[in-house]
Amino acid sequence: MKQRLLNILIALDQLLWVVLTLGKGSPDETISAAAWRMEQQGKVAGRVLRPLIDALFYPLERDRCRLSFESERDGKQLPPLYRKEINHV
């Protein structure tokens, strides 16, 4: 049950990101991951969103946006059948 709720929350997060970007955002990217990516690209939206999101999640998780980005990049949210072994050095 806990995993199902988490899956629903992630899906809503991804949907909200696509809606907020009027379809320009990736349908598989969460707002947290997008905020980290945009900040690394030097975009103003990332410099504003990333600290806000990290502050909201701080009591539960440190570096929320970075961890979300790394999870997306590494495919950790994918079912085992779809995962590739990725070696990051």
Image (cartoon, helix red, strand yellow):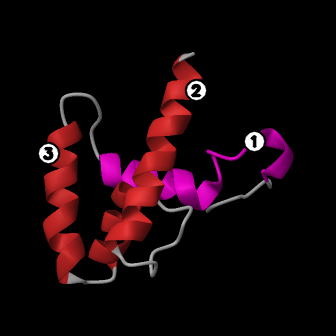
* Residue at the image position 65 percent from the left and 53 percent from the top: 75
The residue singled out by tag 1 in the image is 79
* Residue at the image position 13 percent from the left and 68 percent from the top: 48
**Dot 3 crowding, Cα within 10 Å, few <14, some 14–19, many 20+:** some
Q: Earlier in the sequence, mark 1 or mark 2?
A: 2
Q: Earlier in the sequence, mark 3 or mark 1?
A: 3
* Residue at the image position 20 percent from the left and 76 percent from the top: 45
On-image quarter of the N terminus: top right
Horizontal and vertical percent position of residue 64: 32, 46
Work out how far the residue at label 3 is from the one at label 1, CA to CA, in angstroms.
Answer: 29 Å
Horizontal and vertical percent position of residue 51: 15, 57
Name the element at disc 1: loop
Q: 35 or 89, which is in the foreground?
A: 35
Q: Which residues are magenta?
A: 64-83
Nearest to the eye among marks 3 and 2: give it.
Answer: 2
On-image quarter of the C terminus: bottom right
> In the figure, 33 relative to 22: above or below?
above
Q: 27 or 71, which is in the foreground?
A: 27
Nearest to the eye among marks 3 and 1: give it.
Answer: 1
Work out how far the residue at label 1 is from the one at label 2, CA to CA, in angstroms.
Answer: 13 Å
Q: 43 or 2, which is in the foreground?
A: 2
The residue singled out by tag 2 in the image is 4
* Residue at the image position 52 percent from the left and 72 percent from the top: 26
The answer to whether residue 30 shows anywhere in this view is no
Name the element at disc 2: helix
Give the residue type at disc 3: Ala
The residue singled out by tag 3 in the image is 55
